[in-house]
Amino acid sequence: MKVEEVSQHERRYALFLAARDSEYVKKMYGGYFNVFVAAFGKEGDRWDLFRVVEGEFPDMDELANYDGFVITGSPYDAYGNDLWIIKLCFLLQTLDSMGKKVLGICFGHQVLCKALGGKVGRASSGWDIGVTKVKIVEDLPPCSFLNEREEIPSSLSIIECHQDEVWDVPLGAEVIAFSEKTGVEMFTIGDHILGIQGHPEYSKDILYNLIERLANNGSIKRSFAETVRCELQVAEPDTKGWEKICRNFLNGR
């Protein structure tokens, strides 16, 4: 009887990995999958990994078995025409029509927006890298995971690393957070869609390594990388606050 009760209450999630594991993250964390499960998972949950960037997707008849889905960041453009991105957009449209919980992070936030009819593109203000203060809108829409307003501060700092952004949210979506640099830091559609531009799952050491790789491959200037590194020494993300928001969302609160 006890075993049946446990199996009935086991929550199942799918992580759509849209980036290849860096050597650093593999060495320190065993891969991005572990980073996400540590940040958003709860004891007793089951998490499955689909490397969508490699063309790995769940079977359509399996989708109903999941309680929620998370789409990771990626070095790819959400508005690109890569076959896996097109396939991912179709899958996200299907999940939306099913009313399934979908959480998009960075690229995931952007591709979720694009799939559901919004617009994304290059940010005119350039790269946003570092710890950014995100402001929560005063008139929050009725979201079950944000209903306890006293638990949600007026602003939260989050790690950011992106050069693309959401230009227009889909029809029916609500912008619930913004920053000085980015107009759409978070958006929701009902209680089942949540997009977050920043990286609630990142630690500063992951960002330090990413900055070094971006500087080495010429994506950002070395001088800019040094400036960001200096700023990071005195800035801290509100990791626990973001993890709570994401867990509340995925757990249906």
Image (cartoon, grey):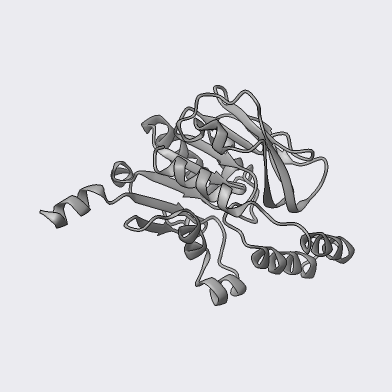
Name which residue lies at 68% across and 63% down. 207
Q: Height in image: 71 above or below 184?
A: below
Query: Residue pushed farthest right?
Result: 223
Tally of numbered tags: 0
Name which residue lies at 78% across and 70% down. 216
Frontmost residue, 241 versus 250: 241
Query: Residue pushed farthest left?
Result: 1
Side of 158 relative to 53 (left or right): right
Name which residue lies at 70% across and 57% down. 236
Frontmost residue, 142 versus 67: 142
Residue 97 occupies which quadrant of the picture? top left
Residue 105 appears at what percent x and percent y?
Answer: 57, 47
Query: Residue pushed farthest front?
Result: 150
Query: Residue pushed farthest bottom?
Result: 27
Residue 201 occupies which quadrant of the picture? bottom right
Residue 224 appears at what percent x and percent y?
Answer: 86, 60
Side of 118 relative to 224 (left or right): left
Residue 144 appears at what percent x and percent y?
Answer: 45, 31
- Visible residue check, residue 241: yes
Quadrant where the C terminus lies?
top left
Name which residue lies at 39% across and 38% down. 252
Residue 215 appears at what percent x and percent y?
Answer: 79, 66
- Visible residue check, residue 83: no
